[in-house]
Amino acid sequence: MYVLHAFKKKSKSGIKTPLPDIHKVQQRLKTAERHLTRRSKARQIVKEAGANLFADFGLPDATEKNAKVQLAVAINQIIKFRHITQKQASVQMKCSQPDISSLQHYKLKIFSFERLIDFLLALNNDIEITIKPKPNRRESPKTTVKLEHTAA
């Protein structure tokens, strides 16, 4: 697997991707293509990603890791949507500012699933957990976190 570039949108004007980022991705793509052609004897398998990348890579506790990431995404979206600082969030969530920084950088090993739920409650959110049978057409069960934005 190749990750050519991951970046936050930094364009100063409009929605156009900055040229240095475009050039960087093009250069890395050429390097990846050269690497693949050198490995032509090796069998290349391309598989579409599923709903849980942790499971796709065969990592242990994939369902829990996926759920924690989804909760962290929701928390980070709420913080961003409400335009509050890390310090303000830490006071409201009763944790340290470095904890908020870790959360925003998705360093989630220090957070339990329950603690992430507590953070959402501290941010004045209702949490609804729905459990339903997996459809037969899908191979494995999944965990989904849905966030409804409000002006609160």
Image (tube, rainbow, N blue to C red):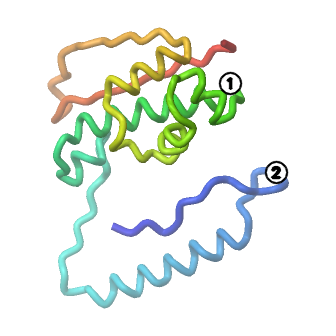
Q: Is residue 83 left or right of residue 90?
A: right
Q: SS at mark 1?
A: loop
Residue 126 is situated, as x and y percent measured from the top left of the image, at 47, 9
Q: Is residue 105 above or below residue 121?
A: below
From the viewer's side, name the closer residue of 65 and 36.
65
Q: Earlier in the sequence, mark 2 or mark 1?
A: 2
Q: Is residue 11 above or below residue 74?
A: below
Q: Residues within 10 Å of mark 2 (few under 14, many from 20)?
A: few
In this rendering, the label closer to the viewer, 2 or 1: 1
Q: Quadrant of the C terminus?
A: top right
Which disc is residue 124 wearing? none
Q: Quadrant of residue 84?
A: top right
Q: Amino acid at mark 1?
A: Arg
Q: SS at mark 2?
A: loop
Which residue is situated farthest in the bottom direction here? 38
Write down the residue under mark 2.
14
Residue positioned 42% across, 29% down in the render: 71
* For the residues bearing labels 2 and 1, Cβ distance under 8 angstroms: no
Q: Residues within 10 Å of mark 1 (few under 14, many from 20)?
A: some
Q: Is residue 47 left or right of residue 87?
A: left
Residue 61 is situated, as x and y percent measured from the top left of the image, at 19, 40
From the viewer's side, name the closer residue of 80 and 144.
80
Residue positioned 19% across, 22% down in the render: 134
From the viewer's side, name the closer residue of 140 and 86.
86
Q: Quadrant of residue 32?
A: bottom left
Q: Amino acid at mark 2?
A: Gly
Residue positioned 59% across, 59% down in the render: 7
Which disc is residue 82 wearing? 1
Q: Quadrant of the N terminus?
A: bottom left
Residue 37 is situated, as x and y percent measured from the top left of the image, at 33, 87
Residue 90 is situated, as x and y percent measured from the top left of the image, at 57, 29
Q: Real-space Cα distance between discs 2 and 1?
A: 23 Å
